[in-house]
Structures are given as structure tokens and as C-alpha cells.
Amino acid sequence: MKHKQDFWVTNISDRNVSLADLNLTIKAYTSVNLLDSKHYYYTLEQVIKSVQIGSISKKQDKIVVRKNAPEIVKNSIQFDMNSVIPSRERSVLNIKEERYEELNISDEQFAEESAEIADLDTKPLIIKEKNHVTSTPIK
């Protein structure tokens, strides 16, 4: 069985930091396990050399070597299936219904006006007679 090794580094700056000797960029405010075989292929000797004389030692103000792995905090929201969902009986908006007299017309008035418009649509605008042209008045 293989012994799992950890070597955690954390970028404490607000910018991405590039480690040239490891050909790696660590994003801002993140922790990385450099000996994680799923993501990286570094040996312990490469990482220790980088800490002693390489880019990790040059960027000590931005990159910190961790002694322990960071704790993973899992945020979860508790949801109760039996809870009562409040109804929205009241709204923040007030809906005001206004009536305008000029828009209140009866169905008969509407039908008369529609019939007049339909009659005007069927008539030609210009009537041609033999010698002169007359136009029909539009109401």
C-alpha cells in the first residue's frame, strides 16, 4: 500500500502567483497539495528544492507552506419538507385600477364605429370620373 504524502501551499495574496521552477500557477486565496498524484506529478525532492532555493522561497510574501491540510467546510442549508410555506397575501406594490370616461364605450357604440370604419375601407379614396377626379370626404 502506498503512503499518501501531503505538501500544502497557500496563496495568501489577491493575485495569481506563478511558480516558474514547478511550471505552476496558484490562484489567489487557494490552497494546493503539490504531492497530489491526481493533479500534479512533482516529487518530494522537487518541492523541497523549490522551497529552499526556488520560486517558493522567492515568493514567501505570497506563498505560505502549510503544516496541516486545510479544513473543508461544507455549507449546507437545512430544509424541512413539512414546513409551511407562507402565502403572499400582501404585496409591496399597490395596484390601482383607474377608470377613464373616454375609454368607457358600450358595445353598440363600438359596433357602430367599427361598421363606419369598415365602410370607409371598402370605398376608394379617389373616384375617377370621365373628365375630372374627385375625392371622397373622410369623416
Image (tube, rainbow, N blue to C red):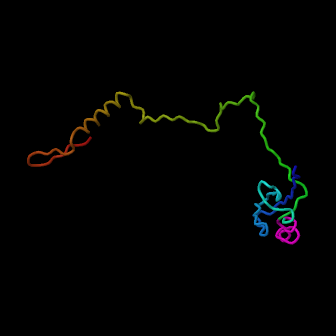
Say which residue appears at 56% left-offset and 36% top-offset: 96
The quadrant in which residue 51 appears is bottom right
Extreme residue in the left direction: 131
User: Does the stretch in magenta take in 60?
Assistant: yes
Q: Quadrant of the C terminus?
A: top left
Q: Nearer the viewer, residue 132 or 26?
A: 26
Whether 106 is among the magenta residues is no
Q: Residue furthest right?
A: 67
Quadrant in the rendering for residue 48: bottom right
Most common secondary structure along the magenta stretch: helix
Residue sitting at x 86%, y 50%:
71
User: Is 30 above or below relative to 55?
Assistant: above
Tell me residue 137's x, y (percent): 22, 43
Residue 36 versus residue 20: which sits nearer the camera? Answer: 36
Whether residue 14 is situated above or below residue 81 in the rendered picture: below
* Residue 99: image location, x then y, percent: 48, 34
109 relative position to 60: left or right? left
Left or right: where 78 falls relative to 86:
right
Is 136 drawn above or below residue 10 in the view shown?
above
Nearest the eye: 42 or 33: 42
Q: Is residue 67 above or below residue 21?
A: above
> Where does residue 74 sit, x and y in percent of width and height?
81, 44
Report the magenta residues as a range.
47-62
Q: What residue do we see at 21% from left, 44% from top?
A: 125
At x 70%, y 31%, the residue is 86
